[in-house]
Amino acid sequence: MLPVVQHHKVAFVLTLVCLAVLSAGVVLAGEPAPLAGLPHRVPAATRPSLPPSTLPGDYVVLAWNDLGMHCYNRSFQDLAVLPPYNNLYAQVLIVGDPPQVVTTGVTVTYVFTDNTYSVGKSNFWDYAQLLFGVDLPPNIGLTGKGMAGDMDAAGDHFVAEGIPLTEFRDSAPTVPYPYQVATIVVYDKATGLELARTTPVAAVSTEMRCNNCHYDNGPGNEGIATGVVEQNILTKHDNENMGDYPPGHEGPLMGRRPILCAECHSSNALGAPGVPGLPSLSNAMHSKHKEIVPDTLDGCYNCHPGPQTRCLRDVMSSRGMDCIDCHGGMAQVAVNPNPWLNEPRCDNAACHGSGFQQDQALYRKSREHGGVFCEACHDSTHAVAPSIEANDALKFVGWQGHAGPLDTCTVCHASSPIGPGPHGLTAPTGPGFTFNPDRYSMREPGQQAIYLHGLHNSGNVADVYHLSFSSSQGWAAVVGAVVGGPTFTLPADVSLVPDQSAVVTVTVTVPDTDTVRTLIDTTIITAASTVSPTLARHVTDLTYVPLYWSVYLPLIYK
């Protein structure tokens, strides 16, 4: 939990804390460079572009972000809902029959190769002392973590909590990029040799759209026009509530900026108790807006990231579910007695039922098969695999050659196990394969979009898959490679033995002319089994060229 120092300031809610994560597809980055500048650690001389088969005694590291999305304020000059504070988790296993979870004899590190600093990308450090009562060194977060370093052993796993990550990469420090890619590397503690690595997403966004309603004289603050969205909110709070401010928190908020909302309104996200008798930050926010903001996904995106970020990106959302299906509407969330700690469960009878039993109150804290965290195989809350965000697939492709969830037994097992596996599921019989996921993105003229898809033989017989594709605008080229085997160019016939995978790479090149604006390229890749000709799968990539250049709307209007 974050340390919270109570002081003379009082808080009002800016907006809700985050649900999770997703945006439209993005260009897949290559594997980040090895850790640099850390003594006595030797990165692997070469890294395969596709995952090798694991052998007994090999190491594998499973890593994930706990929430799927962490929010923070774009500016801390006037008020703060959440600071820059991101978390990474990892479990290290030795491949075997059975695999073994290990926490000794190894060092686990994290780094963001294109996000090495935060000061200058956020003004948080200018106001940390006033908001949280701590004088932080540059680029160090509230728990003492920086943008790279060692993860801490915590029982059966490793964790780096409180990383002060922003949504801006070093290579484009003014362009929001919510789906930051971390590199997790495991080293032998005695020799410094690299044992394993992976690339989870650490999602982060400032897209809390208070400006949708709280602009000058907006519907959220009629008659109030300070020129700054946050100051409009504080002024409205003073107008409506100043007479009821509790002892020790008297006086107008506008005269005591910056304001930490959790000073008065408790927040489990911050470990902040608030003032007894006042509603929690979540309850207050949902209650205040419950008959104003509609109970729809777009309604939620008024406060949670957001119409551009689109943080809800998991497999359930791709099948038509949204926030309300699990959490209920605004009125229901407004009466949650313990927000953040009392949340929907996978083993609810209306959802997956007892076959997917959680051993903890929260999915993100639960373990199942062999003591491995649920999120290690299925990924983060609100990003449950397969996600429609391209970067979320990177680690799964690295482990098993195709997108998630982690369903290839031999990533961790030395040989394919016999009998029921996780959730009582058994290995498939006969031919079978997976081919996923669908992708989409927005590109300007002259840019490229690169999409990765995983083809995996999930049956127990060898098969040959005929791969073909079509591109509505003729902009796509499609190639691929069998994991540990040959490359190919579509159309192609690809042979895979059971549990073997291939990666299909689609490159869409948008012509460098404004005449293509508003056009959409629809690329459809089809895989058909030759063992069972009626068995076919296809994936679709949509590449949209906008009418105008994309513009990021700032939170503060002046």
Image: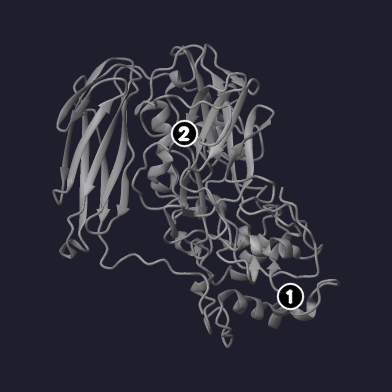
Quick check: 67 left or right of 508?
Answer: right
Q: How many marks?
A: 2
- Which residue in the rendered view is the most extreme toward the right? 247
Which corner quadrant of the image does residue 531 belong to? top left
Residue sitting at 45 percent across and 21 percent down?
411
Above/below status of 511 relative to 63: below
Residue 414 rendering spot, x and y as whole percentages? 47, 13
Query: How packed is label 1: few (under 14 Cα within 10 Å), some, or many (20 or more)?
Result: some
Which residue in the structure is indicated by mark 1? 256
Label for residue 304?
none
Above/below status of 394 relative to 45: below
Q: Which residue occupies the foreground of this view, 173 or 223?
A: 173
Discs 1, 2 touching: Cβ within 8 Å: no
Quick check: 361 left or right of 396?
Answer: right
Residue sitting at 34 percent across and 64 percent down?
550
Quick check: 61 left or right of 483?
Answer: right
Q: Give the image's coloring scheme.
A: one colour
Local SS, label 2: loop
Residue 294 rendering spot, x and y as whole percentages? 50, 67
Residue sitting at 31 percent across and 20 percent down?
484
Which residue in the structure is indicated by mark 2? 34
Three-letter amino acid code of the residue under disc 1: Arg
Residue 406 rendering spot, x and y as whole percentages? 45, 29
Q: Do we see residue 157 in this rendering?
A: yes
Query: How packed is label 2: few (under 14 Cα within 10 Å), some, or many (20 or more)?
Result: some
First reached walking from the N terminus: tag 1 or tag 2: 2
Residue 267 rendering spot, x and y as whole percentages? 70, 57
Q: Do we see residue 334 in this rendering?
A: no
Q: Which of marks 1 and 2 is in front?
A: 2
Three-letter amino acid code of the residue under disc 2: Pro
